[in-house]
Amino acid sequence: MEVVSTLQATSVRGSAQAPASGKVCVIDTVDGFASLRDAWDRLVSDGRESPIFLCHGWFDAAWRWHAKSASLHILAYFEGTELKAILPLVRQTWRIGTQRIRALEFLSVPDAQHCDVVVAHASRAVAARAFVEELAARHREWDVLRLGYLHDDSVASTELRSEFGGRGFRSAVCATNPNPFVCLDSTWSCYYDTRTRRLKKASNLAANRVERAGPVRIEWLSPGSGNAEDVDRVIKTIVGISARSWKAKTGNSLDQSGPQQLIRRLSAAAHERGWLSVWILYLRDLPVAMEYQLVAEGNVYALRSDFDARYQEISPGSHLNRVALEQLFGQGLKRYYMGPGANAYKYRWCDQAISMHKLEVFSHSIWGRLLASWETGVKPVAKRIRDRFSSGGTADREIKLSEW
């Protein structure tokens, strides 16, 4: 495999279980990143869940979002010339007052629903050890490692964290917003019968408001359908909807440079692989709401939904979501994931959710130690004291440090 000779290589040290030929390469150029594509995707096909969020095309699209604000720092573990594992990172800089905090984070975006080390199952332990060896050797070059969108059994929160702990690095794992989902293996009528009367009433009212507003047309660019021109037209349409949504004030609407680069790159790659699914609701032939999905391995991942803010009172986004969900039943699909978040409306439709976590590892640098003291010491104590007082019944007694 030619890529090894073109990349910066660092030998893996101090591991009796690691093959003598094992090495970690640090990829910090776009060309180096691109050269890994085929070998990367072969790793993803080795029985991993959520292939969409681990494939090279997803990270390539995510890089388009970060290109102006971060730098690539992808760790690739090789045995001989064979790629065995990838830790897809970027370097970011935060500021606390005048101090710069050097962070390593997953190459990810707010629309992600999963992330992890990309590795064949048989290589989990040795790859984790190799990556930690590399990061430990360079501990003065970073202050904190932040890895989000982790599932319970992720490599990052199990093997990787354990290896860091064995080398004296302090770390913290905290729960983040779960990812709610709807099972699609029954019928729509059976599922809808389980929803509350309140939800059904709100859904019917939204449908009536939309119907009264004018002729309604819903377009679905389903997985595997359409050509490149159809994709380009649909993406232009949803970018326009997003530009007129409330998200325009947040900087994350699809007309912004980073998000637009992401959605265009991702859509081209997803359409090529038969993953792209886009729903658009038109009122009087004007596009007013959309939902952007990816579909793979029988699962539907709703990445983004937007609506034209001028039509907020008639709830076109809610109506489109309900229609799209109904159509997904009976398609031979397994689950519809709504995306991590604490949004109340998601839990009106869902009874189950996938747990999500975030791992933070603190370097031995000065600021790494300070952050570790705050995140693993002061902050948890302060939170527990606050929670104890806010729950009532504690204001009239002394809180002993031994309780914490």
Image (tube, grey):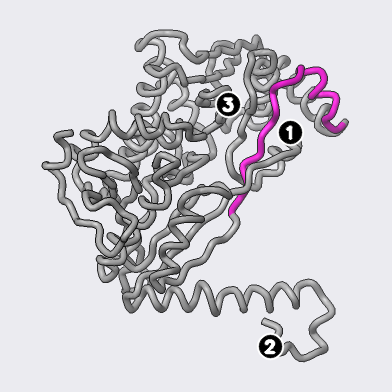
What percent of the width, then of the height, locates residue 178?
Answer: 63, 47
Question: Would you call the spot at circle 3 few (<14 residues within 10 Å), some (14-19), or many (20 or more)?
Answer: some
Residues under labels 2 and 1: Cα distance? Answer: 43 Å
Image quarter for residue 181? top right
Q: Name the kind of residue labelled 1 in the image.
A: Trp
Q: Are marks 3 and 1 in contact (CB under 8 Å)?
A: no
Query: Please, what is the three-letter code of the amino acid marked with disc 2?
Result: Ser
Compare marks 2 and 3 and give the one earlier in the sequence: 3
**On the image, numbered disc 2 is attached to which residue?**
402
Q: Residue at x 54, y 61 (%)?
A: 173
Left or right, 275 with respect to 37, comes to right
Q: Is residue 308 visible?
A: yes
For the C terminus, the quadrant is: bottom right
Q: Amino acid at mark 3?
A: Asn
- Mark earlier in primary sequence (3, 1): 3
Image depth: mark 3 or mark 1 in front: 3
Instruction: Looking at the picture, tell me which residue is in the foreground, 207 or 85.
Output: 85
Question: Label for residue 349?
Answer: 1
The image shows residue 284, relative to residue 33, as above or below, that is above
Q: Residue at x 43, y 74 (%)?
A: 371
Quadrant location of the N terminus?
top left
Give the SS element for disc 1: helix
- Label 2: element kind: helix
Residue 36 location in percent, x, y?
A: 25, 35
Highlighted magenta segment, given as a residue range: 176-196
Above or below, 276 relative to 65: above
Measured in 3D between alpha carbons, the distance from the residue under mark 3 to the one under mark 1, in whole angstroms, is 17 Å
Q: Point out residue 314 in the picture as x, y percentages from the top left corner.
A: 69, 27
Residue corresponding to mark 3:
299
